[in-house]
Amino acid sequence: MDHLQKGTPLPPYDPKLAWGVDGAPQASPNHEAEAWGSELLRSALAVRDHQPNEPARFATAKKVVLDAYFPREFGEGGKGIGLWASETLCPDAHGGQHLTGLMLTRLASVISQDAQLLPLSDRLVRQNGAALLCFATTPDLEVWSCGCRAPGKPAATAATAWLREMFGAPQKGDIAQNPNAILDTFYLATRIARHMGSGILKKQGVQAGPCILKYPMTVYRFKQGHLSIMTAAASKRPPSPASDWCQVIYSKTGPAAVTYGTDWRTAVPKVPDGAQPTRFPQKGSSRRAATGGRKPGA
C-alpha cells in the first residue's frame, strides 16, 4: 500500500514468502490468506511497473489463488472448507488478517484486470460482506459473533471497521479518534477498502446472507439484538478456545450489551420469540437458509 500511496519501493520477490497451495509449515489459514494475497498484489504491481521476470511470478501467484484460496473460502472442490477455513468467524486479530488477505487479493485483481480473478475476488468480497452483516448491530454495523480462536470476549474491531468502510458507514473508535490509525497494519483491510472507494458493497446492494462455514452456525435476529450459536455436534466442535454463543442487545445511547459463552461451559440463552434465523451450513449440507434479506442498518 505504501508503494501505491506514497511511492515507496516495491518489496522484491522472496521465494520464502511466495507460498504454494499448501501454505507453509505451521501456517494458519489467516497467514495463508495474507501470504497468497501479498504475493499476488506484489507481482501484479511489478507487472504493471514492467519489472523483469514478474509475468511468470504473477501467473504462479494467480494459480495458487485460483487453486487454493477461492475454493477454500467458497467451500468448493477438494480444497473447499468455508469462509475463513478452520478459523470460522474468529475475532481480533485473526479475523482482520483474513480480511486483509481478501482485500490484497481483490486489489491485485483490479490492478491486473485479470479476467479470471476479477469475478471471483468480487464474489468473495461480497460473500464476506453479506456474512458479516448477519452479525452486525443495527444501525452502526458493529460485528459481534461466536467463532473460533476466541479465548475471551469475541471483539471484532478490525472486521467492524472494514464492514463500515465497505458500506460507507461512519467510522468510530480508533479510526474516528485518530485518522492515522488506519495506517496501522491492524486496519490494513480497511485502508485498502478506503483506497478502492468507500461504500463499495452499499453501491452493489449487498444484503445480509449466509455462506458455507467449516463449523455451522445459526444467528437469530430480533428487535432488540441478535444471538449467534455454533451448532456443530459435540464430536465435531472446533478446538479450544472457541466462543460457542454470543448475544448482543443493541442500545441507542451507548455500547451494545454483549454476553458470550466459551467452550460450551455455559448454557445458551433462550432464543426470543419471533426471532428470525439465518443458518450457515457446512460443505456438503443443504444450502437452504432462513433469512429475511435484511439491508444494512435496517
Image: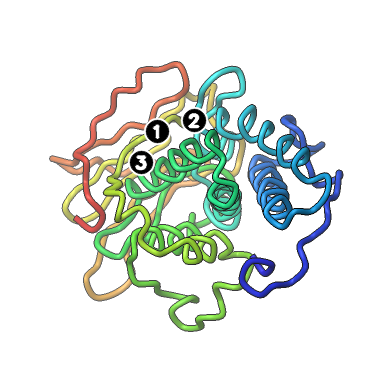
Above/below status of 293 relative to 252: above
Q: Secondary structure at mark 1?
A: loop
Residue 144, by quadrant, is bottom left
- Which amino acid does the dot numbered 1 rest on? Cys
Earlier along the polypeptide chain: callout 3 or callout 2? 2
> Which residue in the structure is indicated by mark 2?
74
The residue lying at 61 percent from left, 31 percent from top is 66
- Which amino acid does the dot numbered 2 rest on? Phe
Whole-Å distance between the Cαs marked 3 and 2?
Answer: 29 Å
Whole-Å distance between the Cαs marked 1 and 3?
Answer: 23 Å
**Apparent side of residue 243 relative to residue 203 in the rendered image (left or right):** right
- Which amino acid does the dot numbered 3 rest on? Val
Above/below status of 179 relative to 115: below
Image spot of residue 135 (x, y percent): 35, 49
Image spot of residue 18 (x, y percent): 79, 43
> Which residue in the structure is indicated by mark 1?
211
Q: Front-most of 107 and 292? A: 107
Q: Are marks 2 and 1 in contact (CB under 8 Å)?
A: yes
